[in-house]
Image (cartoon, grey):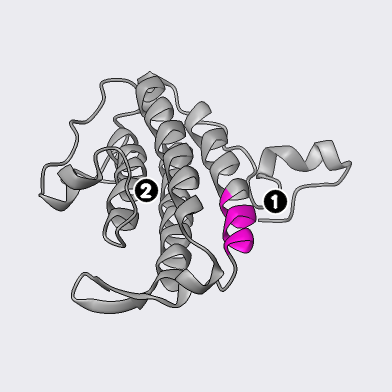
Amino acid sequence: MFRRLDDFRASFAHARESYLKILDAIPESAAGTAVADGHRDLRRMAFHLVETLIEMPARTGLKLPHGEAFLANQPLPLPATMAEIRQAYVNAAEALQNALEAWNDATLEVSDDMYGQSWKRGETLGILLTHQIHHVGQMTVLMRQAGLRVPGIYGPAKEEWEAYHMPAPAI
């Protein structure tokens, strides 16, 4: 749970940049990779994070582009390309940062109905961030399955240890 908006902003800035590295590493040819039939592929999972950056904060009353549509169960159509998803994410992240200007640290103690539960806004921001991290982890597994190089985001990826002049950890 966040108690200070500046702490969320700093954490989100790192998570945002990490996610953009992931998006940039997914070519169109691999966007259809899924763990199994009936599960989200990389394209759908990538866009799910765009949707969440709009939908979850909209439930707190923050005014975001397309927020009212999500609350009315009218989600956005899935973009055709990873480049479009990347741009949608950049736009949603910027809109969230701008919308948060309406809050102050005391606002983080306000509770909202979130999916039938009562969450403080500081908790909602924490869940928003960990939700993204959770799905980024899933995406890195799908990227490995697709034979893609995974960028390091919370430390070096296996292929990046050399840049630190260190051997990759033993498997």
The boundaries of the magenta stretch are 5-12
Query: Which residue is found at the position 43% from the left and 28% from the top?
Result: 86
Secondary structure of the residue carrying tag 2 is helix
Q: Quadrant of residue 89?
A: top left
Q: Which residue is mark 2?
A: 53
Q: Kindly identify the amino acid type of the residue bearing the numbered disc 2.
A: Leu
Q: Is residue 68 left or right of residue 83?
A: left
Q: Quadrant of residue 109?
A: bottom left
Residue 146 visible? The answer is: no
- Direction right: furthest residue: 165
Return the x and y of residue 28 as percentages of the image width and height: 37, 20
Return the x and y of residue 162 as percentages of the image width and height: 81, 38
Look at the image and say whether residue 8 sits in the magenta stretch. yes
Labels 1 and 2 touching (C-beta < 8 A): no
Kindly report the distance in space between the C-alpha atoms of the residues bearing marks 1 and 2. Answer: 24 Å
Residue 104 visible? The answer is: yes
Q: In the displayed structure, would residue 90 be above or below residue 69?
A: above
Q: Which residue is mark 1?
A: 155
